[in-house]
């Protein structure tokens, strides 16, 4: 969706050291990674964010968001804060609420264009 694309674009802009390899959902159809094929067979990938690390381990939803934040030095403190016991319980419900209501956040997408999203 446009909101997800906008967020991915923001991540790409912050990712100066290229710690993330951001891919649109449509790339999962062509992806050679066996973990992507397995993930696609188990769930509807359109419902949430997915992160696959360098070992092939994957996470989805709020945990995936935390793992992506941890990779970006500017956002890693936010991830550490959200992993604190009291706040950790709110991550998944907060992520689910945002995902279920993302159409309401379409204004975030604006006329954003990102040249780096989807690049190898």
Image (spheres, rainbow, N blue to C red):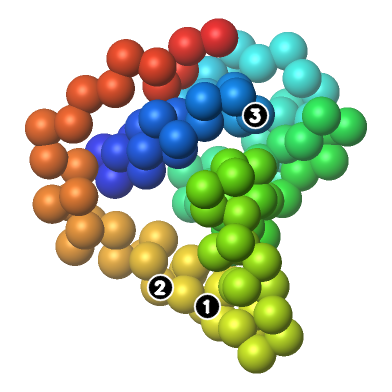
N-terminal of the pair, mark 1 or mark 3, is 3
Residue picked out by circle 3? 19
Residue picked out by circle 2? 97
Report crowding for label 1: few under 14, some 14 to 19, many 20 or more residues within 10 A (C-alpha).
few
Q: Could you give the CA–CA distance between mark 1 and mark 2, rounded to whole angstroms?
A: 6 Å
Of circles 1 and 3, the one toward us is 3
Residue picked out by circle 1? 93
N-terminal of the pair, mark 3 or mark 2, is 3
Q: Dots 3 and 2: beta carbons under 8 Å?
A: no
The answer, for residue 85, to whether it is visible in the render is yes
Residue 29 lies, with reference to residue 86, above or below; the image says above
Dot 1 falls on a residue whose secondary structure is helix
Dot 3 falls on a residue whose secondary structure is loop
Residue 67 lies, with reference to residue 55, above or below; the image says below
Coordinates of residue 13 in the picture (x, y in percent):
40, 30
Please identify the quarter of the rendering in which residue 110 is found: top left
């Amino acid at each position: 969706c446009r909101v997800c694309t906008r967020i991915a674009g923001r991540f790409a802009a912050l990712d100066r050291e290229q710690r993330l390899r951001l891919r649109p959902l449509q790339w999962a159809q062509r992806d050679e990674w066996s973990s992507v094929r397995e993930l696609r067979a188990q769930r509807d990938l359109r419902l949430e964010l997915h992160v696959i690390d360098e070992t092939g381990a994957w996470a989805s939803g709020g945990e995936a968001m935390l793992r992506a934040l941890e990779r970006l030095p500017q956002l890693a403190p936010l991830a550490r804060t959200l992993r604190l016991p009291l706040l950790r319980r709110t991550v998944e419900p907060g992520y689910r609420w945002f995902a279920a209501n993302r159409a309401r956040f379409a204004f975030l997408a604006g006329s954003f264009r990102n040249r780096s999203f989807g690049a190898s």
